[in-house]
Amino acid sequence: MSTLLLLAEGFEAAQLPCTLVLLVTGIAVGMTARETAIPAMVSFSLSVLVFSWTRFSDRGAGWHTLIAAIALIAAVVILFLPPIRRLDLVAIAAGVLVGFAAAELWLPCVGEQFGRLLMQLPERGLSGVALMAIFLTGTLSPVLALAAIHHLTPDWILERVEPIWSVVGGFLLSGLAVATAVGYHETVLGWLFEWSVR
Amino acid sequence: MATKTKNTGRNNRRRSTNDDRRVLTSRTVAVVVVLLAVMGLLSARYGLGPSEESVTATDATSEGTGSAVAPPALAETPPNLGPAVELTDIDGWINADPTTTGLSSYGGQVRIVQYWTFGCFNCKNTLPHLKEIYNRYQPDGLEIIGVHAPEFDYEADPNNVSAAVVELGVNWPVALDTSKTNFRSWQGDRRFWPRTYVIDQNGDIRFDHIGEGAYDELEATVAHLLANGA
Protein backbone atom coordinates (compact mmCIF):
# COMPACT_ATOMS: atom_id res chain seq x y z
CA MET A 1 0.00 0.00 0.00
CA SER A 2 2.73 2.44 0.96
CA THR A 3 4.43 1.66 -2.37
CA LEU A 4 1.36 2.94 -4.19
CA LEU A 5 1.34 6.01 -1.95
CA LEU A 6 5.00 6.54 -2.84
CA LEU A 7 4.11 6.48 -6.55
CA ALA A 8 1.22 8.88 -5.91
CA GLU A 9 3.58 11.19 -4.02
CA GLY A 10 5.93 11.04 -7.00
CA PHE A 11 3.13 12.24 -9.29
CA GLU A 12 2.33 14.99 -6.78
CA ALA A 13 6.01 16.01 -6.67
CA ALA A 14 5.97 16.41 -10.46
CA GLN A 15 3.76 19.47 -9.92
CA LEU A 16 6.01 21.14 -7.34
CA PRO A 17 8.57 23.85 -8.13
CA CYS A 18 11.28 21.89 -6.28
CA THR A 19 11.15 19.31 -9.09
CA LEU A 20 11.43 21.85 -11.88
CA VAL A 21 15.16 21.23 -12.36
CA LEU A 22 14.49 17.57 -13.21
CA LEU A 23 11.62 18.28 -15.56
CA VAL A 24 13.17 21.22 -17.39
CA THR A 25 16.43 19.36 -18.04
CA GLY A 26 14.69 16.08 -18.97
CA ILE A 27 12.30 17.73 -21.40
CA ALA A 28 15.06 19.95 -22.83
CA VAL A 29 17.32 16.95 -23.49
CA GLY A 30 14.45 15.17 -25.26
CA MET A 31 13.67 18.22 -27.38
CA THR A 32 17.30 18.76 -28.34
CA ALA A 33 17.90 15.09 -29.22
CA ARG A 34 15.29 15.24 -32.04
CA GLU A 35 14.90 11.75 -33.57
CA THR A 36 16.98 10.21 -30.78
CA ALA A 37 14.69 11.68 -28.10
CA ILE A 38 13.63 8.30 -26.69
CA PRO A 39 17.13 6.86 -25.93
CA ALA A 40 18.15 10.30 -24.62
CA MET A 41 15.17 10.55 -22.26
CA VAL A 42 15.45 6.92 -21.09
CA SER A 43 19.16 7.30 -20.32
CA PHE A 44 18.39 10.65 -18.62
CA SER A 45 15.79 8.98 -16.37
CA LEU A 46 18.11 6.08 -15.49
CA SER A 47 20.93 8.48 -14.79
CA VAL A 48 18.74 10.58 -12.46
CA LEU A 49 17.74 7.39 -10.66
CA VAL A 50 21.29 6.09 -10.19
CA PHE A 51 22.91 9.39 -9.23
CA SER A 52 20.13 10.67 -6.96
CA TRP A 53 20.08 7.29 -5.17
CA THR A 54 23.88 7.51 -4.83
CA ARG A 55 23.65 10.98 -3.36
CA PHE A 56 20.65 10.49 -1.07
CA SER A 57 21.87 7.17 0.30
CA ASP A 58 25.30 8.62 1.18
CA ARG A 59 27.09 6.24 -1.17
CA GLY A 60 28.70 8.99 -3.22
CA ALA A 61 32.26 8.25 -2.20
CA GLY A 62 32.18 4.50 -2.94
CA TRP A 63 33.74 3.10 -6.12
CA HIS A 64 31.19 0.30 -6.16
CA THR A 65 28.43 2.77 -6.94
CA LEU A 66 30.29 4.22 -9.86
CA ILE A 67 30.95 0.71 -11.16
CA ALA A 68 27.25 -0.15 -10.68
CA ALA A 69 26.25 2.98 -12.58
CA ILE A 70 28.62 2.23 -15.44
CA ALA A 71 27.42 -1.40 -15.54
CA LEU A 72 23.80 -0.28 -15.69
CA ILE A 73 24.43 2.22 -18.45
CA ALA A 74 26.55 -0.29 -20.39
CA ALA A 75 23.78 -2.88 -20.05
CA VAL A 76 21.26 -0.46 -21.53
CA VAL A 77 23.61 0.40 -24.40
CA ILE A 78 24.26 -3.32 -25.11
CA LEU A 79 20.53 -4.02 -25.09
CA PHE A 80 20.03 -1.41 -27.75
CA LEU A 81 23.18 -2.21 -29.72
CA PRO A 82 21.94 -3.84 -32.98
CA PRO A 83 19.73 -0.98 -34.15
CA ILE A 84 21.89 1.64 -32.50
CA ARG A 85 23.65 4.30 -34.54
CA ARG A 86 26.41 6.72 -33.62
CA LEU A 87 23.78 9.39 -33.14
CA ASP A 88 21.95 7.25 -30.57
CA LEU A 89 25.17 6.65 -28.60
CA VAL A 90 25.71 10.39 -28.44
CA ALA A 91 22.10 10.86 -27.29
CA ILE A 92 22.52 8.20 -24.57
CA ALA A 93 25.75 9.80 -23.35
CA ALA A 94 24.10 13.24 -23.35
CA GLY A 95 21.11 11.86 -21.43
CA VAL A 96 23.40 10.32 -18.81
CA LEU A 97 25.40 13.54 -18.38
CA VAL A 98 22.32 15.76 -18.12
CA GLY A 99 20.75 13.24 -15.73
CA PHE A 100 23.86 13.37 -13.53
CA ALA A 101 23.73 17.19 -13.47
CA ALA A 102 20.00 17.22 -12.72
CA ALA A 103 20.41 14.71 -9.86
CA GLU A 104 23.19 16.88 -8.39
CA LEU A 105 21.14 20.10 -8.64
CA TRP A 106 17.90 18.58 -7.36
CA LEU A 107 16.92 19.67 -3.83
CA PRO A 108 13.66 17.85 -3.18
CA CYS A 109 10.63 18.99 -1.22
CA VAL A 110 9.68 15.84 0.64
CA GLY A 111 6.32 14.36 1.55
CA GLU A 112 5.60 11.66 4.12
CA GLN A 113 6.29 8.50 2.07
CA PHE A 114 9.38 9.80 0.29
CA GLY A 115 10.60 11.13 3.66
CA ARG A 116 10.33 7.63 5.15
CA LEU A 117 12.23 6.23 2.19
CA LEU A 118 14.98 8.86 2.47
CA MET A 119 15.37 8.13 6.19
CA GLN A 120 15.85 4.42 5.39
CA LEU A 121 17.89 4.82 2.20
CA PRO A 122 21.43 4.67 3.69
CA GLU A 123 20.62 1.24 5.24
CA ARG A 124 18.75 -0.16 2.26
CA GLY A 125 20.35 -1.98 -0.65
CA LEU A 126 18.76 -2.63 -4.04
CA SER A 127 15.25 -2.29 -2.65
CA GLY A 128 16.11 1.36 -2.07
CA VAL A 129 16.85 1.78 -5.77
CA ALA A 130 13.56 0.07 -6.65
CA LEU A 131 11.58 2.34 -4.34
CA MET A 132 13.42 5.41 -5.65
CA ALA A 133 12.51 4.23 -9.16
CA ILE A 134 8.84 4.04 -8.19
CA PHE A 135 8.92 7.57 -6.80
CA LEU A 136 10.80 8.87 -9.85
CA THR A 137 8.36 7.16 -12.23
CA GLY A 138 5.76 9.58 -10.88
CA THR A 139 8.12 12.54 -10.62
CA LEU A 140 9.50 12.14 -14.15
CA SER A 141 6.07 11.32 -15.62
CA PRO A 142 6.05 14.51 -17.76
CA VAL A 143 9.39 13.45 -19.33
CA LEU A 144 8.07 9.92 -19.95
CA ALA A 145 4.83 11.36 -21.33
CA LEU A 146 6.83 13.49 -23.75
CA ALA A 147 8.72 10.38 -24.88
CA ALA A 148 5.37 8.62 -25.47
CA ILE A 149 3.99 11.61 -27.40
CA HIS A 150 7.17 11.65 -29.49
CA HIS A 151 6.69 7.95 -30.26
CA LEU A 152 3.02 8.39 -31.22
CA THR A 153 3.50 11.51 -33.34
CA PRO A 154 3.51 10.76 -37.09
CA ASP A 155 6.83 11.23 -38.86
CA TRP A 156 5.60 14.01 -41.14
CA ILE A 157 4.70 16.13 -38.11
CA LEU A 158 8.00 15.33 -36.34
CA GLU A 159 9.98 16.36 -39.41
CA ARG A 160 8.36 19.80 -39.27
CA VAL A 161 8.36 20.30 -35.50
CA GLU A 162 11.72 18.81 -34.47
CA PRO A 163 13.95 21.57 -35.87
CA ILE A 164 12.08 24.19 -33.79
CA TRP A 165 11.94 21.93 -30.70
CA SER A 166 15.63 21.24 -30.85
CA VAL A 167 16.50 24.96 -31.00
CA VAL A 168 14.23 25.72 -28.01
CA GLY A 169 15.58 22.70 -26.07
CA GLY A 170 19.18 23.54 -26.91
CA PHE A 171 18.67 27.16 -25.88
CA LEU A 172 17.11 26.04 -22.58
CA LEU A 173 19.90 23.55 -21.85
CA SER A 174 22.73 25.91 -22.71
CA GLY A 175 21.04 28.72 -20.74
CA LEU A 176 20.79 26.43 -17.72
CA ALA A 177 24.41 25.31 -18.17
CA VAL A 178 25.65 28.92 -18.15
CA ALA A 179 23.37 29.82 -15.21
CA THR A 180 24.65 26.80 -13.25
CA ALA A 181 28.27 27.68 -14.00
CA VAL A 182 27.80 31.18 -12.56
CA GLY A 183 25.56 29.98 -9.69
CA TYR A 184 22.31 31.47 -11.00
CA HIS A 185 20.38 28.31 -11.93
CA GLU A 186 17.98 28.71 -9.00
CA THR A 187 17.21 32.24 -10.20
CA VAL A 188 16.48 30.98 -13.71
CA LEU A 189 14.30 28.15 -12.42
CA GLY A 190 12.53 30.66 -10.15
CA TRP A 191 11.72 32.80 -13.20
CA LEU A 192 10.43 29.74 -15.04
CA PHE A 193 8.28 28.78 -12.06
CA GLU A 194 6.87 32.30 -11.61
CA TRP A 195 6.19 32.49 -15.35
CA SER A 196 4.45 29.10 -15.31
CA VAL A 197 2.06 30.08 -12.48
CA ARG A 198 1.35 33.60 -13.75
CA MET B 1 16.85 10.71 -63.70
CA ALA B 2 19.56 11.69 -61.24
CA THR B 3 16.99 13.51 -59.07
CA LYS B 4 14.73 10.45 -59.06
CA THR B 5 17.60 8.19 -57.89
CA LYS B 6 18.53 10.73 -55.19
CA ASN B 7 14.91 10.85 -53.92
CA THR B 8 14.66 7.04 -53.85
CA GLY B 9 17.89 6.87 -51.86
CA ARG B 10 16.64 9.45 -49.36
CA ASN B 11 13.31 7.61 -48.99
CA ASN B 12 15.11 4.31 -48.40
CA ARG B 13 17.31 5.94 -45.74
CA ARG B 14 14.25 7.41 -44.01
CA ARG B 15 12.45 4.04 -44.14
CA SER B 16 15.50 2.36 -42.65
CA THR B 17 15.75 5.03 -39.93
CA ASN B 18 12.07 4.58 -39.15
CA ASP B 19 12.52 0.80 -38.92
CA ASP B 20 15.46 1.31 -36.55
CA ARG B 21 13.40 3.70 -34.50
CA ARG B 22 10.57 1.14 -34.25
CA VAL B 23 13.00 -1.56 -33.07
CA LEU B 24 14.57 0.89 -30.63
CA THR B 25 11.16 1.88 -29.27
CA SER B 26 10.00 -1.71 -28.85
CA ARG B 27 13.23 -2.48 -26.99
CA THR B 28 12.74 0.60 -24.82
CA VAL B 29 9.24 -0.57 -23.96
CA ALA B 30 10.58 -4.07 -23.19
CA VAL B 31 13.32 -2.68 -20.92
CA VAL B 32 10.84 -0.40 -19.12
CA VAL B 33 8.40 -3.31 -18.62
CA VAL B 34 11.20 -5.51 -17.23
CA LEU B 35 12.39 -2.69 -14.96
CA LEU B 36 8.83 -2.09 -13.70
CA ALA B 37 8.42 -5.82 -13.04
CA VAL B 38 11.72 -5.96 -11.09
CA MET B 39 10.74 -2.83 -9.17
CA GLY B 40 7.34 -4.34 -8.38
CA LEU B 41 8.90 -7.58 -7.13
CA LEU B 42 11.52 -5.78 -5.04
CA SER B 43 9.05 -3.34 -3.53
CA ALA B 44 6.56 -6.14 -2.79
CA ARG B 45 9.34 -7.98 -0.97
CA TYR B 46 11.08 -5.00 0.63
CA GLY B 47 8.40 -2.26 0.57
CA LEU B 48 8.47 0.66 2.94
CA GLY B 49 6.55 -1.43 5.46
CA PRO B 50 4.54 -0.09 8.37
CA SER B 51 5.52 3.11 10.18
CA GLU B 52 8.03 2.82 12.97
CA GLU B 53 6.46 1.55 16.16
CA SER B 54 8.71 3.52 18.50
CA VAL B 55 5.78 5.62 19.69
CA THR B 56 2.73 4.50 21.64
CA ALA B 57 -0.27 6.69 22.39
CA THR B 58 -1.50 6.51 25.97
CA ASP B 59 -5.20 6.82 26.69
CA ALA B 60 -5.43 9.44 29.42
CA THR B 61 -9.06 8.67 30.23
CA SER B 62 -8.01 5.44 31.90
CA GLU B 63 -5.80 7.49 34.21
CA GLY B 64 -8.64 9.80 35.09
CA THR B 65 -7.00 12.95 33.80
CA GLY B 66 -9.82 14.02 31.49
CA SER B 67 -11.23 13.12 28.13
CA ALA B 68 -8.23 14.10 26.00
CA VAL B 69 -5.74 11.56 24.69
CA ALA B 70 -2.39 11.98 26.45
CA PRO B 71 0.70 12.80 24.39
CA PRO B 72 2.37 9.83 22.73
CA ALA B 73 5.16 8.23 24.74
CA LEU B 74 8.50 6.98 23.45
CA ALA B 75 9.32 3.30 23.86
CA GLU B 76 12.92 4.22 24.67
CA THR B 77 15.11 7.27 25.29
CA PRO B 78 15.66 9.22 22.06
CA PRO B 79 19.16 8.58 20.66
CA ASN B 80 21.81 11.27 20.94
CA LEU B 81 22.82 12.19 17.38
CA GLY B 82 25.60 14.56 18.41
CA PRO B 83 25.87 18.28 19.03
CA ALA B 84 23.90 20.73 16.89
CA VAL B 85 25.92 23.23 14.90
CA GLU B 86 25.35 26.89 15.86
CA LEU B 87 23.42 28.94 13.31
CA THR B 88 25.73 31.34 11.49
CA ASP B 89 25.41 34.05 8.83
CA ILE B 90 21.74 34.64 9.64
CA ASP B 91 20.42 37.64 7.68
CA GLY B 92 17.74 38.51 10.17
CA TRP B 93 15.05 37.21 12.47
CA ILE B 94 11.26 37.38 12.37
CA ASN B 95 9.11 36.95 15.53
CA ALA B 96 12.26 37.04 17.66
CA ASP B 97 13.76 39.26 20.31
CA PRO B 98 16.16 41.81 18.71
CA THR B 99 19.02 40.35 20.74
CA THR B 100 18.58 36.86 19.23
CA THR B 101 21.76 35.67 17.56
CA GLY B 102 21.36 31.93 17.10
CA LEU B 103 20.56 28.66 18.82
CA SER B 104 22.51 29.78 21.89
CA SER B 105 19.93 32.52 22.48
CA TYR B 106 17.56 29.70 23.42
CA GLY B 107 20.22 27.75 25.34
CA GLY B 108 18.98 25.33 28.00
CA GLN B 109 15.61 24.92 26.27
CA VAL B 110 14.20 22.07 24.22
CA ARG B 111 14.14 23.37 20.64
CA ILE B 112 12.58 22.18 17.42
CA VAL B 113 14.65 23.42 14.48
CA GLN B 114 12.95 23.11 11.11
CA TYR B 115 14.53 23.92 7.76
CA TRP B 116 11.78 25.20 5.49
CA THR B 117 10.87 27.64 2.76
CA PHE B 118 7.47 29.25 2.33
CA GLY B 119 7.12 28.15 -1.29
CA CYS B 120 7.49 24.47 -0.34
CA PHE B 121 4.17 22.64 -0.39
CA ASN B 122 5.37 19.90 1.96
CA CYS B 123 6.78 22.43 4.45
CA LYS B 124 3.40 24.15 4.63
CA ASN B 125 1.73 20.80 5.33
CA THR B 126 3.83 20.41 8.50
CA LEU B 127 2.81 23.79 9.96
CA PRO B 128 -0.57 22.80 11.52
CA HIS B 129 1.19 19.96 13.37
CA LEU B 130 4.01 22.22 14.56
CA LYS B 131 1.46 24.81 15.73
CA GLU B 132 -0.34 22.14 17.74
CA ILE B 133 2.90 21.00 19.38
CA TYR B 134 4.00 24.62 19.99
CA ASN B 135 0.70 25.56 21.65
CA ARG B 136 0.86 22.49 23.85
CA TYR B 137 4.50 22.63 24.97
CA GLN B 138 5.62 26.26 24.74
CA PRO B 139 4.42 26.93 28.32
CA ASP B 140 6.70 24.07 29.45
CA GLY B 141 9.76 25.58 27.76
CA LEU B 142 9.64 24.42 24.13
CA GLU B 143 10.86 26.80 21.45
CA ILE B 144 10.55 26.32 17.69
CA ILE B 145 13.09 27.92 15.38
CA GLY B 146 12.12 27.94 11.73
CA VAL B 147 15.23 28.32 9.60
CA HIS B 148 14.01 29.77 6.32
CA ALA B 149 16.30 28.56 3.51
CA PRO B 150 14.90 29.79 0.19
CA GLU B 151 15.11 27.80 -3.03
CA PHE B 152 14.12 30.54 -5.49
CA ASP B 153 14.79 34.28 -5.57
CA TYR B 154 11.23 35.28 -4.73
CA GLU B 155 11.51 33.19 -1.55
CA ALA B 156 14.71 35.02 -0.59
CA ASP B 157 13.08 38.47 -0.38
CA PRO B 158 12.67 39.23 3.38
CA ASN B 159 9.44 41.14 2.69
CA ASN B 160 7.95 38.07 1.02
CA VAL B 161 9.08 35.88 3.93
CA SER B 162 7.53 38.28 6.47
CA ALA B 163 4.26 38.33 4.52
CA ALA B 164 4.23 34.52 4.27
CA VAL B 165 4.95 34.14 8.00
CA VAL B 166 1.89 36.29 8.77
CA GLU B 167 -0.28 34.56 6.18
CA LEU B 168 0.69 31.06 7.34
CA GLY B 169 0.22 31.97 11.02
CA VAL B 170 3.78 31.09 12.01
CA ASN B 171 4.24 32.60 15.47
CA TRP B 172 7.64 31.17 16.41
CA PRO B 173 11.05 32.75 15.66
CA VAL B 174 12.16 32.46 12.05
CA ALA B 175 15.85 32.81 11.09
CA LEU B 176 16.61 33.98 7.56
CA ASP B 177 19.23 31.64 6.12
CA THR B 178 19.19 33.35 2.72
CA SER B 179 22.64 32.14 1.68
CA LYS B 180 21.67 28.58 2.78
CA THR B 181 24.92 28.38 4.79
CA ASN B 182 23.17 26.54 7.64
CA PHE B 183 20.99 24.49 5.29
CA ARG B 184 24.25 23.09 3.84
CA SER B 185 26.25 22.79 7.06
CA TRP B 186 23.45 20.96 8.92
CA GLN B 187 22.39 18.63 6.13
CA GLY B 188 25.58 18.00 4.15
CA ASP B 189 24.91 16.33 0.81
CA ARG B 190 21.51 15.03 1.90
CA ARG B 191 19.66 18.36 1.77
CA PHE B 192 15.86 18.45 1.84
CA TRP B 193 12.84 20.60 2.63
CA PRO B 194 11.42 20.24 5.22
CA ARG B 195 13.87 18.74 7.70
CA THR B 196 13.02 18.76 11.37
CA TYR B 197 15.37 18.34 14.32
CA VAL B 198 14.84 18.35 18.08
CA ILE B 199 17.68 19.81 20.16
CA ASP B 200 17.83 18.98 23.84
CA GLN B 201 18.72 21.23 26.78
CA ASN B 202 22.45 20.44 26.29
CA GLY B 203 22.42 21.38 22.61
CA ASP B 204 22.48 17.80 21.27
CA ILE B 205 20.31 16.57 18.40
CA ARG B 206 17.80 13.96 19.63
CA PHE B 207 15.47 13.70 16.62
CA ASP B 208 16.03 14.09 12.89
CA HIS B 209 13.30 13.62 10.29
CA ILE B 210 13.15 14.32 6.57
CA GLY B 211 9.86 15.43 5.00
CA GLU B 212 6.34 15.41 6.34
CA GLY B 213 5.08 12.98 8.96
CA ALA B 214 6.45 11.40 12.16
CA TYR B 215 4.50 13.99 14.17
CA ASP B 216 3.74 11.56 17.02
CA GLU B 217 7.43 10.72 17.34
CA LEU B 218 8.33 14.42 17.24
CA GLU B 219 5.84 15.23 19.97
CA ALA B 220 6.89 12.23 22.04
CA THR B 221 10.55 13.30 21.83
CA VAL B 222 9.68 16.83 22.95
CA ALA B 223 7.48 15.56 25.79
CA HIS B 224 10.19 13.11 26.90
CA LEU B 225 12.92 15.77 26.95
CA LEU B 226 10.74 18.29 28.77
CA ALA B 227 9.71 15.73 31.37
CA ASN B 228 13.02 13.92 31.88
CA GLY B 229 15.67 16.42 30.82
CA ALA B 230 18.49 15.71 28.41
Image (cartoon, helix red, strand yellow):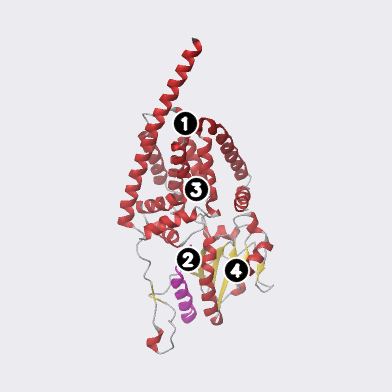
- Residue A25 is situated, as x and y percent measured from the top left of the image, at 53, 43
Mark 3 or mark 1: whose residue is earlier in sequence: 3
Residue drawn at x 62%, y 44% is: A179
Callout 3 amino acid: Ala
Subunit under mark 4: B
What's the magenta region?
Answer: B208-230
Q: Quadrant of residue A43?
A: top left
Q: Secondary structure at mark 3?
A: helix
Q: Residues within 10 Å of mark 4 (few under 14, many from 20)?
A: few
Can you identify the residue that label 3 sits on? A103
Q: Is residue B192 above or below residue A38?
A: below
Q: Residues within 10 Å of mark 2 (few under 14, many from 20)?
A: some
Q: Quadrant of residue A77?
A: top left
* Distance (Cα) linking label 2 and label 1: 53 Å
**Dot in front, 4 or 3:** 4
**Observer-nearest residue: A176 or A66?**
A176
Asked if the residue at tag 1 contacts the one at tag 3, i.e. Cβ–Cβ closer than 8 Å, the answer is: no
Can you identify the residue that label 2 sits on? B208
Can you identify the residue that label 4 sits on? B168
- Residue B203 is situated, as x and y percent measured from the top left of the image, at 53, 71
